[in-house]
Each structure stands twice: as structure tokens, then as C-alpha cells.
Image (cartoon, rainbow, N blue to C red):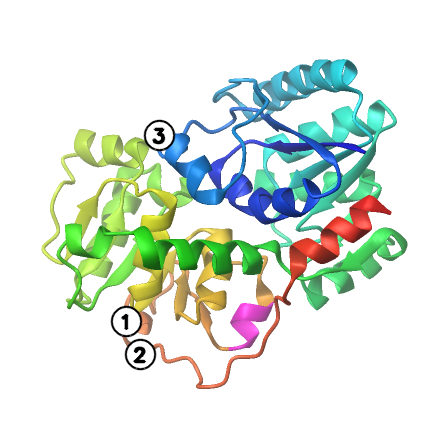
């Protein structure tokens, strides 16, 4: 079969990589990159490290309002699908590319697969929540990562087309960590080889767009008196610069890191602080305590296990709860194994 994989950001390429390696064993694959997120780190080195081909199509859509960006991606993908006529398309996660790719394919009668299906944060203010709900309801085959996702599928009448396969990031991280251990020199470069540190990522608009809120978060974390490594997105760095928020004694701002280097930083961190959905899950798989700087999470199992602490930055317990956070010794396996192989079999059926 000809299978088109549709992605729009580096995290989706990371998820695509292990499934791509499986699908290429028996099918012809084309990769369509919407260009929804521009990422300096997604270069030839990234594709070489992940052992996947560069995209067959880069649509270079770029940023825009929710409606405008989604519409432009949908229109551009539709034209590619009309030309290529794939037998299957695969979309990932919850971005505008996910929604646009799914809509374009189902309207053309192409069997459509959603990876990381049936996750819910139950917060419809988040555009990602709308994207995942619509994608799940229009796609033909839903590949769910967890038992909780299967429960969501049942509650929404989607169970007949949903399969519990585990989370593709288990395979991605296993592959990436082996590469990082061998090739990454980031700890030496940053002088962190014998240093304890926390790793911070922030990108949610409600955490970074308002300078006062961003200052409040960084000021609070600075009071923990622990070294915090913060790879800063260029957009966030501009907000910091334009607001004269430039220095905190215990927070070290660094440039965004290449994928393998970031994996190495995660692997050696004491605690991971983040407002990212994906990083919560990766922290769990890496057996790293995670503090999620949000009100809700799609990965409720990680919270129930005691390894992920939900801590909104407006909570009176912020930031002191971070100092007191200790996960239990036991960690249940919730994300499965050999996930890409299971997915490839279902997609090929």
C-alpha cells in the first residue's frame, strides 16, 4: 500500500519515526510536513539521527490564527492527497495539522488513522482538545495509548474502531536514548556532567505570553534555590528581552536543543518542570519526577501513579510543593511496549 504520514512539528516526527521504520518494511511511505511549526533543530542531522527520510512534501504553511492556519493546511494537504492517492493516511496527536489532515483525507474517502487517539483534558479552551475530539470522531481507525483513552472512547461511542496499542513514544525514546548515550555531548558542553539540576520547559500561552505571569513563574522557581536549566524558545526569549526580564540567579537560560541533546538533558535531570503534554509522558517513561505547571492533563494516569504533580502556577502551593514532591518507589507500566509493530499490523489490515 501507499501510506501517507502527515505531521507538522518536531514532536510529531519523533512519534512518526518508529512507525515509519516499521511501515517501510512492507509499504511505500510518503511523509507530508505541513510546516505548521518552524524548528531550527529539525535539520539533516535530526532526520539522520532518527533514521527517517526527509519529508516528501514540505508545505511551509507557517503560523497564523487557528482558523486561518487550519484552513491553509487543509487546502494544501488536499491537493497532495489528490495527486498521490494514498491508500491510508496517518495523523498524530492534537495539532491543527492533525485536524486538517484528518478532514482532508476523510472527505476524499481515504482510510484515516489517528495515533495517540482518545486522550482528553476536558478543557475545551485548549485548541488541542477540539482538534483531538474532531479527529477521533472522523477517523476510521483509532490507536489509543492507554486504558484511560479506551475509557474515553467508550464514553463517546468510539470503542468499535479503537484499539489499545500503547504509546509510540516508548519506542521513540528507547531508540533515541541509545543514540543520545552514544552521540550526545550536551552535558559536557554545558558543564553539567557532575551537577544536579532541574529541567524546565514552558510554551503554553497562558504561562509565557503575559510578561508579568512569566516573571512570576520564573521568580517562584528561582526561590527554590536549585539549578534550573531552561531551553528557551525564541518567542519566549523575545518576551523576556522586551520586558527586561533577563536574569535569575538559579535559572540558566540556554538555546533550544537538538532532539538527542534534549533527551540527554531529560535523562540526567533530577526533576522535570513543564507545561507540555508530551514531556509529562516522556518524563514518566524515563522514570523522572515531573511537575506539570497546568490545571489539567491528558495523562491522568501519570498523576494517579504519583509520578506527575499537577501544580498550576497560580496555586498557593506554587512553588513550595515542588520542593516537597517525592514520587513513590514503584511505578506501574502504563504505556506498553513494541508499540510501532502493533500499530503497523493494524494499519496494514
Image coords of residue 182 (percent x, y): 33, 56
Tell me which numbered mark, 3 or 1, is placed earlier along the sequence.
3
Quarter of the rendering containing residue 92: top right
Residue at the spot of label 3: 40
Residue at the spot of label 1: 320
Image coords of residue 260 (percent x, y): 36, 49
Q: Nearer the viewer, mark 3 or mark 1?
A: 3
Image coords of residue 89 (percent x, y): 75, 33
Q: Nearer the viewer, mark 2 or mark 1?
A: 2
**Pointer 3 and pointer 2: residues touching (CB < 8 Å)?**
no
Magenta-drawn segment: 301-305
Kindly identify the residue that appears in the image at 60 percent across and 50 percent down: 123
Quadrant in the picture for the N terminus: top right
Q: Would you say residue 201 is visible in this rendering?
A: no
Residue at the spot of label 2: 324
Residue 244 lies within the magenta run:
no
Q: Secondary structure at mark 1?
A: helix
Amino acid at each position: 500500500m501507499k501510506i501517507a504520514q502527515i505531521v507538522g512539528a518536531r514532536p510529531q516526527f519523533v512519534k512518526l519515526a518508529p512507525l515509519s521504520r516499521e511501515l517501510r518494511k512492507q509499504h511505500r511511505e510518503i511523509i507530508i510536513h505541513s510546516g505548521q511549526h518552524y524548528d531550527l533543530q529539525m535539520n539533516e542531522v535530526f532526520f539522520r539521527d532518527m533514521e527517517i527520510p526527509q519529508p516528501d512534501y514540505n508545505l511551509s504553511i507557517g503560523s497564523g490564527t487557528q482558523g486561518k492556519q487550519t484552513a491553509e493546511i487543509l487546502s494544501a494537504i488536499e491537493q497532495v492527497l489528490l495527486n498521490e492517492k494514498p491508500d491510508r493516511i496517518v495523523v498524530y496527536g492534537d495539532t491543527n495539522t492533525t485536524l486538517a489532515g484528518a478532514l482532508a483525507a476523510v472527505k476524499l474517502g481515504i482510510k484515516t488513522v489517528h495515533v495517540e487517539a482518545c486522550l482528553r483534558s476536558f478543557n475545551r479552551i485548549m485548541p488541542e482538545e477540539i482538534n483531538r475530539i474532531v479527529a477521533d470522531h472522523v477517523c476510521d481507525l483509532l490507536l489509543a495509548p492507554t486504558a484511560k483513552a479506551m475509557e474515553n472512547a467508550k464514553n463517546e461511542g468510539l470503542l468499535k474502531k479503537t484499539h489499545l496499542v500503547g504509546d509510540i513514544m516508548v519506542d521513540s525514546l528507547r531508540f533515541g536514548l541509545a543514540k543520545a548515550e552514544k552521540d550526545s555531548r550536551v552535558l559536557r558542553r554545558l558543564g553539567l556532567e557532575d551537577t544536579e539540576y532541574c529541567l524546565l520547559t514552558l510554551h503554553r500561552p497562558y504561562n509565557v505570553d503575559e510578561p508579568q505571569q512569566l516573571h512570576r513563574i520564573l521568580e517562584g522557581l528561582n526561590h527554590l534555590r536549585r539549578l534550573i536549566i531552561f531551553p528557551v524558545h525564541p518567542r519566549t526569549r523575545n518576551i523576556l528581552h522586551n520586558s527586561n526580564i533577563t536574569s535569575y540567579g538559579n535559572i540558566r537560560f540556554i538555546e533550544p536543543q537538538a532532539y538527542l541533546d534534549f533527551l540527554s538533558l531529560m535523562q540526567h535531570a533530577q526533576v522535570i518542570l513543564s507545561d507540555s503534554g508530551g514531556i509529562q509522558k516522556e518524563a514518566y517513561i524515563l522514570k523522572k519526577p515531573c511537575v506539570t505547571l497546568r490545571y489539567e492533563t491528558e495523562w491522568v494516569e501519570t498523576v494517579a501513579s504519583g509520578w506527575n504533580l499537577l501544580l498550576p502556577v497560580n496555586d498557593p502551593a506554587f512553588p513550595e510543593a515542588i520542593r516537597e514532591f517525592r514520587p513513590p518507589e514503584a511505578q506501574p507500566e502504563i504505556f506498553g511496549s513494541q508499540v510501532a509493530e502493533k500499530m503497523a499490523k493494524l494499519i496494514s489490515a
